[in-house]
Image: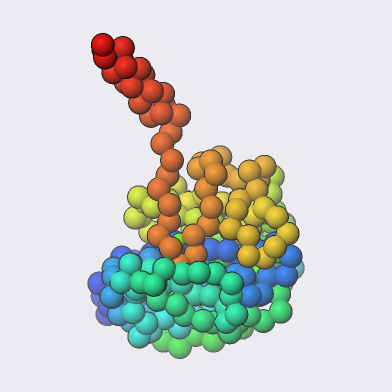
Amino acid sequence: MILPVDVAITDTNVVLLSEAKVNPPGEDAPYEFVEIRGPANKRLTNLFLVAVQGNSSSAPGRLDTIVDLNGRIIGTNGLLIVAAPGHPYLFSPGTTVLLAPQLAESGGAFDNGSGSILLLGCREELDEGDDLDNGDNGRLEGLPRTAYIVDAIGWTDGGNNDEVYGGVDLSQRNFTPDAAGRFPGSNAPLSKASWFVGDLAGTNGSSLNFDSENVSGNTPTGNVMTPGVINKSRPPSRRTRSRRSRVSSVIRRTKP
Ligand SMILES: [Ca+2]
Ligand SMILES: [Ca+2]
Ligand SMILES: [Ca+2]
Ligand SMILES: [Ca+2]
């Protein structure tokens, strides 16, 4: 998508989606969250977090949830978290916390089937319930002309004619993800390779553990969600570990 010149690009192009918990085990409220990453102490302008409906049986392209980020300031640790009032999480002191009442409503705010989460740069007013895809064909032709997609993730549950919006399709063949995380070193917006997805383990909505049976193939072993905390480093790959152990055995052999 072409960036229009009259949007405050410098304010938004370094702001990224960082984590999303869409389908907590059991009842979703008040456990859903979306973590956003950006420059520490940066004031956001013309920026919205938007959940777009993707199920063909519902209304593909409908804006189910809009959280206005205008005037919010990224935390001193580079994080802003959108969470529900009454959430159970412990955030880092440097994280900006935005409590969004939609996330506390029964069933939560984010569709557990097919849907997309967008960071949207937009100067015009958007309303929850607006359907920006009149053709139900995966294109948001109803987006205001000055709007652009800063970052996005989405997936489908495999339903016929379901849609993913924003271009980052994290759909899995064998399961519908509950949550998604960005690799800490990945700074690319609108990048599928920057993300892993998985189901969440356990029966408690506050669960931060992935179900190792249902994760994307690139998910780091033992990785957990870190709401309001900087994402954990990716563990060393098997190749790195074996090289390191070879080096240490060489060192051991050279000792007297
Ligand atoms: Ca659930
Ligand atoms: Ca949900
Ligand atoms: Ca539609
Ligand atoms: Ca995190």
Indicate the position of residue 12 as horizontal and vertical percent values.
32, 72
Indicate the position of residue 135 as horizontal and vertical percent values.
61, 70
Q: Is residue 253 left or right of residue 115?
A: left
Which of 210 and 64 lies nearest the eye of the viewer?
210
Q: Is residue 221 left or right of residue 136?
A: left
Which of 152 and 243 lies nearest the eye of the viewer?
243
Q: How many marks?
A: 0
The quarter of the picture showing ligand 2 = bottom right
Q: Is residue 240 above or below residue 19?
A: above
Q: Is residue 12 visible?
A: no
Indicate the position of residue 51 as horizontal and vertical percent values.
56, 72
Instruction: Residue at 62%, 70% (x, y): give it.
Output: 31
Instruction: Residue at 49%, 75% (x, y): give it.
Output: 82
Instruction: Residue at 28%, 75% (x, y): give it.
Output: 41
Q: Is residue 131 left or right of residue 232?
A: right
Residue 239 occupies quadrant: top left
Indicate the position of residue 194 as horizontal and vertical percent values.
43, 50
Q: Is residue 231 above or below residue 53?
A: above
Residue 249 occupies quadrant: top left
Residue lying at the far front in this picture: please name it. Answer: 256
Instruction: Residue at 44%, 47% (x, y): give it.
Output: 193
* Quarter containing the C terminus: top left
* Quarter containing the N terminus: bottom left
Q: Is residue 116 visible?
A: yes
Q: Report the colour scheme.
A: rainbow
